[in-house]
Structures are given as C-alpha cells and as structure tokens.
Amino acid sequence: MQPMLERERNFAVDEDVILQLTTQDHGTWDLRLRLKAVTDVDQQPLLVMIPISSTRLSPDRPAQAQATATFNQNPEQIVSILVEHNGAVLMQDNGSGYLAIPQAIQTEDTAQTTAARLLTQAGVSADVGFVYSAYRDIARNQQHIIFLCHAHHAEAPKGVFMDPDQSTLMDIADPVVCSVISRFERESQAGLFGTYVGNERHGDVQASTDSAQQK
C-alpha cells in the first residue's frame, strides 16, 4: 500500500499536502496533511505531518466532484473561547492527550450565548469578549468563531492557564489554534489586538475597536 502524490515537488512549511491512498479493503482516500516545523527535546528542528482531514472517493465519482459536494453543505458552526490571564491562556485536554481551547458546536441562538456556556463549564470568572478570529475551515466544512476573554483570576477547575510558548504550541492538536495563540502572544506583547477574518489558511487581521476596552 503506497500513498501517491499528485505531482512531485518541494513543499513549504504550513502548506497542505494531499496524498491519495488506495487500500484493498477500504477503497481510495484523499488524505490532507499539513507540514509543521517543530523542535525536539534537544531543540533540533523537525518537520512533522499533522492529519487534517480524509475523504473517501466513490469509485464512480471523481475526486473534484466529491470535494465540491462536501464543501457546498451548510458549514457546522463552531464556537471557541481563548481565555487569557496576564498573558497565559486557558488550555484543556482534548481527550486524546493533546491541548485544545474550549469549544462547542453552536446550539444556542447566538455565538455569544454558546461562549458564555463554555466559560461556565470551564468554571472561569470572565466575560465574553470580542471576536478574536472568524474563519471558515474549508477542509472540515466548519465556520469558526473564537472570542477573546480576559479572566478575572487564574483559577480554572477544568483546565490550566499556560504560557503561550513553544512547548505549549507543540502539544496543541489543531494547527489553526496554534496560529491563533501565536498571534495572541505577539499582540499581547504589543498591547494591541485585532480580529482575524478568512479561512484556515489565508486571511487578514483587522484592528478591533473593542480590544482596548476589553484589556
């Protein structure tokens, strides 16, 4: 069983790579992986591939048509909270041994209500802040909204506040969340926050009129 690249070329860090994998029992799959640059325990640079998504291709249906059909579905609405206290961010175990920020599918009327529920579930004393990131994850057919919330203290019964350094980033499951937290660290040092708008790969950071009031 050998994965096949569509074409041979050099790949860049943070670029998505599509591998087509054919198995005897389970058909053909498109596997989407992302290249990430990390360091090992000896601080040596490494390149790792992080699985992003997989799509099974029907034998009578070309890959492009199947991908288009998937992405045309109504995206799942995902609400997350990035809770910070004195520069540290609230992280939780995602159940697979990796770190994640609190998130949930939006079931309430508004994203703010879902964010407030996440704060309550985490046991954190904080108010729902402004929208720190709003992006479409095309690969997963999801629409994400992340609220930046400033905690009144560093107590969290369900989670722990961690410095957003390299060791923390290496333990985060979602590369998009890694990017969000890296941006938070830079903006926190500068004292000026913005709102990211785009998709999981490309977008723009817009100045937020609410960030000064929230800090």
Image: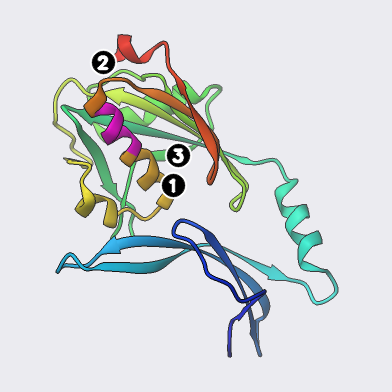
Image-based side of 192 in relation to 147, left or right: left
> Mark 3 is on which residue type?
Ala
Q: Do the residues labelled 3 and 1 touch (CB within 8 Å)?
A: no
Q: Which mark is residue 104?
A: 3
Q: Position of residue 120 (x, y in %)?
A: 30, 28
Q: Which of marks 3 and 1 is nearer the N terminus?
A: 3
Hey, which quadrant is residue 43 in on the image?
Answer: bottom left
**Foreground: 20 or 43?**
43
- Inspect this view and state whether residue 121 appears: no
Residue segment shown in magenta:
183-188
- Inspect this view and state whether residue 176 appears: yes
Badge 1 is on which residue?
176
> Mark 2 is on which residue type?
Lys
Hey, which quadrant is residue 192 in on the image?
Answer: top left
Badge 2 is on which residue?
215
**Vertical position of residue 211 compared to residue 35: above or below:** above
- Between disc 3 and disc 1, the foreground one is 1
**Foreground: 112 or 50?**
50
